[in-house]
Image (cartoon, helix red, strand yellow):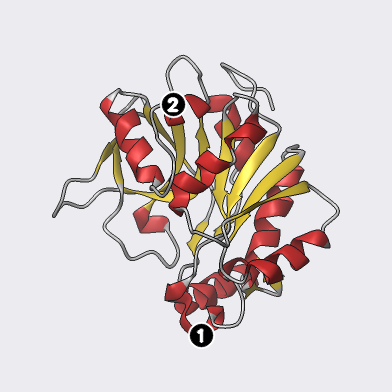
Amino acid sequence: MTTSGSTLSDTAMVLAAGKGTRMRDLASERPKPLIKVKDTPLIDGVLDRVSAAGIRKVVVNVHHFAGMLRDHLVSRQEPEIAISDESDQLLDTGGGVARALEHFDGRPFFVLNADVLWLDGRANTLSRLAQRWSDEEMDALLLMCFTVNAIGYEGLGDFMMADDGRLSRREEQCVAPFAYSGIQVLHPRLFDAVPGGVFSLNRLWDKAESEGRLFGLIHEGAWMHVGTPEGVSAAEDVLSSL
């Protein structure tokens, strides 16, 4: 996938290893990525979008009900799936991506949460991110949503955004207009100084922010926060109305 300043890897990563505790009973017998919204498992919705954007291969990390998720992914014809097994130890978001870095050939790559649910605006969302990416300016590019338009979202927001797209963290006790959508592009160089093991991607975002290399792009379509049973119901109501 060609961008304005580079060529992204043809391999992406989908983060699917979390325990989904906020889903309560819905995740008591299955991994969160296999919870269905309108009869479609969450992870299939993500993988279908990734494949449609021309990404050939996807690394999926597994931990919670790992065998069940593996069995489900085997049934897919495309994209090609590589499993990063964290059954022995859950590595958090940053550690999970760090373990999979060898798949991206040193090029920037997409990372998506397995529970992301979105509708495109005027253009394909992943293509918009790819076109906005610039190797010269960025180490991380996050897709951001206006909190007031986010379906099922009740937080205080995550970031402020400057006119040039640079992001800065919401200060404590303040409200920010943008929420992180669970979709991003990262450059492997962000991980150069990370020793490995268990750590959050927040650590790398903070590093990129401190160097002026953390950017955002505003999502043009609908975005649904599917983190709870109530979020699942809200998303199904929206999709049923289309």
Position of 198 compared to 133: left or right? left
Q: Quadrant of residue 16?
A: bottom right
Q: Circle 2 sits on which residue?
A: 192
Q: Quadrant of residue 127?
A: top right
Q: Give the farthest residue toward the bottom.
A: 25
Find residue 170 and name its label.
none
What residue lies at 35% left-to-right and 29% top-to-bottom?
208
Pinpoint residue 240: horizontal percent, then vertical percent: 64, 73
| In-front residue for pair 190/122 | 190
Quadrant into which the N terminus falls = top right
Q: Circle 1 sits on which residue?
A: 25
Q: Secondary structure at mark 2?
A: loop
What residue lies at 44% left-to-right and 26% top-to-bottom?
192
Position of 166 compared to 70: left or right? left
For residue 123, say whether it is visible.
no
Residue type, label 2: Asp
User: Which comes before the other along the chain, label 2 or label 1?
Assistant: 1
Pinpoint residue 74: horizontal percent, then vertical percent: 81, 60
